[in-house]
Image (tube, rainbow, N blue to C red):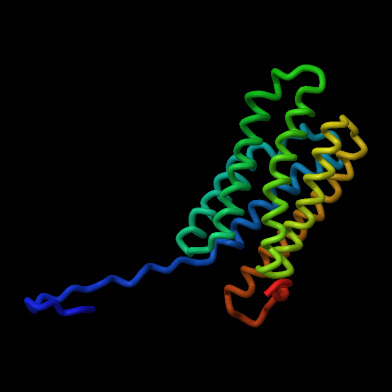
Amino acid sequence: MTVSDDRTVQSTPAAPTIADPAPLGLGAFALTTFLLSVVNAGWAGSSTGNAWLGYAFAYGGLCQLLAGMWEFKNKNVFGATAFSTYGGFWIGLGLWARLVAPHATGHQSSYDLGWILLAFAIFNTYMMILALQVNIAVFGVFLTLELTEIFLFIGNFSTSDTVVKIGGYIGIITALVAWYASAANVANGIGGKIRLPVGAPLVA
């Protein structure tokens, strides 16, 4: 609060605070990654193989994008960039699956996915390196995701079901790591007796 020369009082309102959106973003990423990865791994069985699609829009897409926007509010540039980008990834992948893939012929869909995943692997590479400054849990998410994207873009470019399946298996691991990081952020954010370690930054 400051008092001006003419004795009028001017108040500066306190900046509003919000809860940490990271657990939501990580949880949304984990669930959608899991649903698509079980398809890539060949575990979906007699299902349609499209269980992931609605959640690409609603949870992995919209909820993760919202988490990214709230991270901007928290002035967390890393979280804002990561969650907003992968929220956009899921929305974009869902749109591609609905609007483009049904009209593809031959191996066009595989090549499309190869380019999409290669592009995101490039983005993920520098985010993985920068995650070394966050904590071990977050670095683990980006490390396993990097491997997932590499195997998937190689598998799609080479139209190799075996390599895509390997990418699916690693994607399931990625989802589990992200779920752990989400659970740890929830537990530690509550401030109760249950605490889950996330590890220190690997690079100070």
Q: Is residue 150 left or right of residue 18?
A: right
- Depth check, front residue: 129 or 98: 129
Q: Between 171 and 139, which is closer to the camera in this rendering?
A: 139
Residue 88, quarter of the rendered image: top right
| The residue positioned farthest toward the left in the image shown | 6
- Residue depicted at x 45% and y 60%: 73
The x and y percentages for residue 10 are 18, 73
Give above or below for 203 relative to 72: below
Q: Position of residue 147 (x, y in %)?
A: 82, 50
- Residue 177 visible in this rendered orientation of the protein: yes
Give the residue displayed 71% in from the left and 46% down from the top: 122
Q: What residue occupies the far bottom of the structure in this picture? A: 193
Identify whether 105 is placed above or below 32. above
- Quadrant placement of the N terminus: bottom left
Question: Residue 103: x percent and y percent?
Answer: 70, 18
Where is residue 15, by image quadrant? bottom left
Query: What residue is drawn where x is 84% and y is 38%?
Result: 154
Q: Which quadrant of the view contains residue 105? A: top right
Residue at the (53%, 63%) spot, across then down:
76
Horizontal relation, residue 96 to residue 146: left or right: left
Q: Is residue 145 left or right of residue 22?
A: right
In the rendered view of the protein, which quadrant contains the C terminus?
bottom right
Q: Is residue 175 left or right of residue 27?
A: right
Which x, y percent locates residue 127?
67, 56
Q: How many marks?
A: 0
Residue 42 visible, this angle: no
Which of 47/80 is in front? 80
